[in-house]
Amino acid sequence: MNQMQSFIEKAKNDKELMAKLDVLGASGAEADKYVALAAEHGFSITEADYQEAAAGSCPHKKGELAEEDLEAAAGGFIDTQNRYNPDVCGKYTQVSYECVGFLRKIWCDHYREKQLPSVGLGGMRYRWQFTCAMGRYDYVGHSDGDPVE
C-alpha cells in the first residue's frame, strides 16, 4: 500500500485526523496543507500524490456506483459515516465537502447520487441526481455537483 493510501486508511479510523481533514476540506485548502498534515502523522506524500488521488477520487469517472456497491465499499474505494450535522448541513442546498468528505472517499450516510440517462445533441452528457436523505437537497446536476441550469 502506498503512502497516500495508508494516509487515507488512517484518516478513516482516526477521528482526530478526520476532523483536521474536514477543516481543511471545508476551507478549500490547497494540496500543501494536506501534505503537511500527512507529514505530521508520519506519512510522506507529495503534492503530486495528493493531486493524483484527488483527480481519481470522483466515482463518476469510474462509472456509476450502485447502492449495493456503496454498502459493500467499506474499506474500499468509498466508506460512509454519519457526517450529518444540522448546524452545518442546514445551510447547504447542494452537494458540499461535508457530503462526500476527504477526496470524495468518505461519504455521509445520508448522501445519495444516481446517474441519469445521457442528454445532449450529438454527444454524451451525463446528469446526476443528488439527494440528501435528511431533506437538505434533491436536484439534478453535473458530475461535479453543480446544478443543471
Image (cartoon, helix red, strand yellow):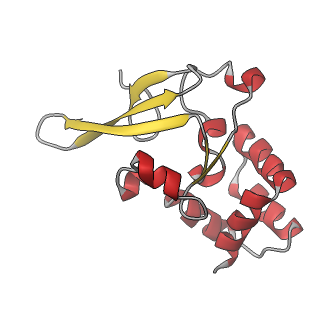
| Left or right of residue 96: residue 25 | right
- Residue 123 placement: quadrant: top left
Residue 99's x, y, as percent? 61, 37
Q: With 103 as the anchor, is 28 left or right in this view?
A: right
- Residue shown at 68%/19% (left/top)? 90
List x then y, in percent, for residue 116: 29, 36
The N terminus appears in which quarter of the rendering? bottom right
Q: Can residue 58 be seen in this view?
A: no
Q: Vertically, is 3 above or below 135?
A: below
Q: Which of 73 and 85 is in front in this view?
A: 73
Residue that lies at the very extreme toward the left in this rendered image: 122
Residue 133 seen in the current view: yes
The answer to whether residue 90 is left or right of residue 100 is: right
Q: Residue 53: x, y in percent? A: 57, 64
Q: Residue at x 82, y 58 (%)?
A: 14
What is the total number of numbered labels drawn onto the structure image?
0
Tell me the residue at 70%/38% (across/down).
83
Q: Residue visible at 67% across and 71% down?
A: 4
Q: Quadrant of residue 95?
A: top right
Q: Decide: is 56 above or below 122.
A: below
Measured along the vertical axis of the image, is residue 138 above or below residue 54? above
Q: Quadrant of residue 76?
A: bottom right
Q: In this view, does 54 lie above or below 119?
A: below
The residue nearer to you, when weighing 134 against 98, is: 134
* Farthest bottom residue in view: 1
Residue 145 position, x and y percent, is 47, 35
- Image quadrant containing the C terminus: top left
